[in-house]
Amino acid sequence: MPAKMKMLAVAIKDPADGPGADDVRRAQAGDVDSFEQIYREHSPRIYALCLRLMAGDAQSATELMQDVFIRAWRRLDTFRGECAFSSWLHRLAVNVMLENARSDGRRTARVLPMEDTGKLPGAAKSSGIELSMDLESAIASLPRGARMAFVLHDVEGYQHQEIAGQLGLSVGTIKAQLHRARRLLRERLER
Amino acid sequence: MTHEVVRHLLDDYVAGDLTEDARVPVLDHIGVCAICRSEVDDLEKLAVQVAALPRAVEPPVQAWAEIRSVIERDARVERTVSRRSSSRLRAQPYALAAAGLLVALVSSGGTALYLRERAAPSVAVAPPAAATADPAGAATLAAFTIEENNYLREAATLADVLEKQQGVLAPETVAQLKKSLRIIDDAILEARNALARDPGNRTLVEMLSANYRHKVDLLRRTTEMTRSS
């Protein structure tokens, strides 16, 4: 039986403004230990996002999070301090996830229609992860498109326009996916 | 506003996305329609539950070690690739394609040399430390697999972009690019096969990693050229 995930109620501090600003500067200069401090600070939030987007599949979520931090390390020199470091990192994480989603989407589209993604091996039903809240399980059981729209909009607070732009879809399509996600969630939570 | 029209606006109403002109008639309708009122209640309840979701989850403890392994290998590979030559290459499309070709040939030659050495009768000479399989070999390969997936995704995305934009490049540049990519792909395949036979060999991992990096780099720079054309 997999270990129950430890939910953390942590406040996300901003290394660019707070005590972690030195870590960012040192990491930009190539200091891996400082980058590890940044990882310790931000990985719980990024991992939570990855888990929800990957339907609770811990292995896929871990790989995705690792991709995000490897790319963050490689692109650290592009962070100029024009925005909060946490925003920069979060934006990068979402971009990596959406890029992966696009390429994964091309692959899975050849095999399964979007409505059937719950049957994929990584779907929540087969993940074995104990998402202790009913809502988490319901989100994980959503079809892929609806889940991405819901997590990015309702959980992470992205605008319709931003999600549509990143996914190459219309705002209308995103709104329709959101409507569908909320309807399915309400139905599943009522059961 | 009819019931059907209002029903389609309830998500935006709850999210606060409606203009004042649209919000007032929806509000009026909700006051008299039990179905819509119930739906609004459900949507608001869901929003409250979503707001209470935990925003952070502790990742698996071993995740950082694998990230660190990739980062440290990056640094080693970085040292072997001359930054000076790559900055010179930015200026010339043909030099760019030629660089890809050269890297591929060197990598391919390196792999071939390595394979020939392995096929030759053993001699009493200690192998270079970097080329020796070590107990951390499995971890090295596991960490590389993450990176390999990363490269494959990035290369696929860039190749898609390039395919759409290649019309702006001269036909001879496209032909040279394709030739370079074929050679790099052959070198990747060769190194990948060698690594499959010797999974703990760090030299092969670095060689393969360098091939992937140069493929992505060649695609990225060519894509940038098409955008600036």
Image (cartoon, rainbow, N blue to C red):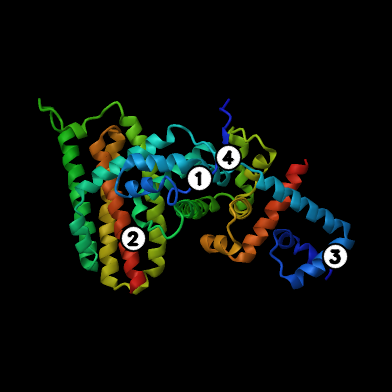
Left or right: B153 in relation to A129 = left
Q: Looking at numbered disc 1 in the image, what kind of residue is underneath it?
A: Ile
Q: Looking at numbered disc 4 in the image, what kind of residue is underneath it?
A: Gly
Q: Which mark is residue A46?
A: 1
Q: Looking at numbered disc 2 in the image, what kind of residue is underneath it?
A: Arg
- The chain holding disc 4 is A
Tell me the CA gap for discs 4 and 2.
33 Å
First in sequence: mark 2 or mark 3? 3
Instruction: Name the residue beneath numbered marker 4.
Output: A56
Mark 4 closeness class: few <14, some 14–19, many ≥20 residues within 10 Å: many
Report if the CB atoms under discs 1 and 4 are less than 8 Å apart. no
| Circle 2 or circle 3, nearest the eye | 3
Tell me the CA gap for discs 2 and 1.
27 Å
| Circle 2 or circle 1, nearest the eye | 1
Q: Looking at numbered disc 3 in the image, what kind of residue is underneath it?
A: His
Q: Position of residue A176 (x, y in %)?
A: 67, 60
Asked whether the residues under marks 2 and 3 belong to the same chain, the reply is: yes
**Closer to the camera in the image, A69 or B156:** A69
- The chain holding disc 1 is A
Instruction: Name the residue beneath numbered marker 2.
Output: B220
Tell me the CA gap for discs 1 and 4.
13 Å
Instruction: Name the residue beneath numbered marker 3.
Output: B29
Q: Position of residue B183 (x, y in %)?
A: 25, 54
